[in-house]
């Protein structure tokens, strides 16, 4: 057998951990990420622990703008007096224990080869094709109890759609989920459910209580889409809020770095829409030297800039891979001391979907390292700017020019989903 979706020894160790903590009877604390992949992974572990006899299970969601590895999270987690902690889809980094002295299991798939102290780790990173955390959780749990296969297989699909989209090929080593997809309403139902589930975490309030209960109580994506579980109305309202914010900011024009490799879009929104706008632009924006699109949100958190970057799908040489994490780290190294002030929340996530949350002052220095001035204009360009999408073409009278509407930015109806599923960086 091959090491998939993670090292088989790690998978067996994680199974032993789940069985052990379920049998001991103490409080098990789940800490899933707030997106569809994290929530589905969390629900999968909740169902598995319950099936194995656990009766005291609690859940903690990291507040907006924070991360599970910070001191503030350790303090918040300690209040639960948990006997065991399971962290799901939060991104990983080295350092001190998340909750010192408490047995901890980490399930993840984000790019990292170092992990917190005192934790058992099952990581899908490096085991191609990389499984989502929800799919890793499904493989881990589905045969722990006879009732679990039917109860959790759709969660593995739903979370995977959330990160990888509905075009996933369920071919080995991925399990064959074709029958589960058909049984639960087809790809459309799953995609509709993803849109609803991902909406609350993107709102300015970032209230996760309702969506967590909906995912936990649902027996199918149909239950969520058709409003058969509590919390769906709040999810629909959240989706409408996010759609409105996307429509408001989607037309912000990109500016290009001095060498043309980076396209920067600047917005100011309390909602986490920067990954959505980056995903849209990366599918349409073209440039001779363009490598990736970066959307910087100056309104998500006070005195900070949260940004999301996505590799340009229309770049001139798609056969040459782009590693965003490596690119961001290399840019920071060109300015002595910049890496230190950018901090641990910089260049996180995946090679093709990265981002970060940094201080406003640090972001100004980062912009210079990327080929912009501190205001996001092309470095060295003065008042002269590269012609942007939607600029009038004055060289040819009557010539129809490309506009933002030609580039996939048709105005969304609040009733329609805005999520273009994409692997999410943590945090961004």
Image (cartoon, grey):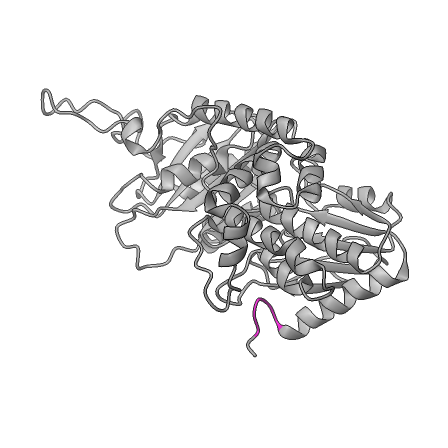
Please give left or right for residue 256 compared with residue 69 in the image.
Answer: left
Q: Taking the image as drawn, is residue 44 in sight?
A: yes
Quadrant including the N terminus = bottom right
Magenta-drawn stretch contains 193:
no
Question: How far across and down, in percent of the image, does residue 377 sit?
Answer: 37, 30
Check the image and name the residue furthest to the left. Answer: 397
Could you tell me what secondary structure mostly forms the magenta stretch?
loop
Q: Is residue 364 above or below residue 219?
A: above
The answer to which of 90 and 176 lies nearer the viewer is 176
Check the image and name the residue furthest to the front. Answer: 183
Question: How far across and down, in percent of the image, does residue 273 sit?
Answer: 51, 32
How many numbered markers are drawn? 0
Seen at 64% across and 56% down, the residue is: 150
Q: Taking the image as drawn, is residue 302 in sight?
A: no
Please give left or right for residue 12 compared with residue 367 in the image.
Answer: right
Quadrant including the C terminus = top right
Magenta segment, which residues?
3-7
Seen at 44% across and 24% down, the residue is: 413
Q: Is residue 40 above or below residue 230?
A: below
The answer to which of 341 and 100 lies nearer the viewer is 100
Please give left or right for residue 187 compared with residue 112 in the image.
Answer: left
Seen at 74% across and 57% down, the residue is: 48
The answer to which of 123 and 308 lies nearer the viewer is 123
Question: How far across and down, in percent of the image, does residue 334 sit?
Answer: 46, 50
């Amino acid at each position: 057998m091959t090491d998939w979706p993670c090292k088989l020894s790690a998978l067996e160790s994680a199974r032993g951990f789940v069985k052990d903590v379920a049998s001991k009877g103490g409080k098990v604390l789940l800490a899933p990420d707030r997106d569809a992949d994290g929530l589905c992974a969390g629900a999968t572990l909740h169902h598995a622990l319950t099936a194995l006899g656990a009766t005291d299970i609690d859940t903690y969601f990291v507040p907006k703008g924070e991360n599970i590895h910070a001191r503030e999270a350790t303090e918040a987690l300690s209040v639960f007096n948990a006997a065991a902690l399971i962290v799901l889809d939060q991104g990983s980094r080295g350092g001190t224990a998340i909750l010192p002295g408490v047995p901890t299991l980490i399930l993840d798939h984000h790019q990292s080869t170092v992990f917190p102290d005192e934790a058992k780790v099952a990581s899908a990173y490096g085991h191609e094709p990389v499984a989502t955390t929800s799919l890793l959780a499904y493989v881990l749990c589905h045969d722990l109890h006879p009732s679990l296969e039917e109860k959790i297989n759709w969660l593995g699909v739903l979370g995977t759609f959330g990160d990888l989209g509905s075009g996933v090929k369920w071919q080995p080593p991925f399990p064959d989920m074709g029958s589960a997809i058909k049984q639960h309403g087809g790809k459309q139902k799953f995609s509709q459910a993803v849109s609803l589930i991902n909406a609350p975490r993107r709102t300015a309030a970032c209230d996760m209580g309702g969506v967590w209960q909906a995912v936990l109580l649902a027996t199918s994506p149909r239950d969520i889409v058709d409003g058969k579980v509590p919390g769906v109305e709040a999810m629909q309202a959240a989706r409408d809020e996010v759609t409105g914010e996307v429509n408001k900011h989607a037309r912000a024009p990109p500016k290009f770095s001095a060498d043309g490799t980076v396209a920067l879009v600047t917005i100011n929104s309390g909602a986490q829409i920067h990954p959505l706008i980056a995903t849209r632009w990366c599918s349409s924006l073209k440039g001779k030297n363009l490598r990736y699109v970066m959307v910087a949100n100056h309104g998500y958190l006070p005195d900070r800039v949260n940004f999301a970057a996505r590799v340009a799908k229309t770049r001139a040489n798609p056969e040459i891979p782009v590693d965003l994490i490596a690119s961001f780290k290399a840019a920071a190294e060109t300015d002595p001391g910049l890496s230190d002030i950018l901090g641990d929340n910089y260049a996180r996530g995946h090679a093709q979907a990265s981002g970060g949350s940094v201080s406003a002052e640090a972001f100004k220095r980062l912009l210079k390292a990327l080929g912009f001035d501190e205001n996001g204009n092309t470095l060295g360009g003065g008042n002269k700017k590269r012609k942007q999408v939607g600029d009038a073409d004055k060289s040819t009278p009557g010539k129809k020019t490309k506009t933002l509407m030609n580039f996939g930015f048709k105005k969304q109806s609040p009733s329609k989903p805005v999520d273009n599923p994409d692997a999410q960086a943590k945090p961004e």
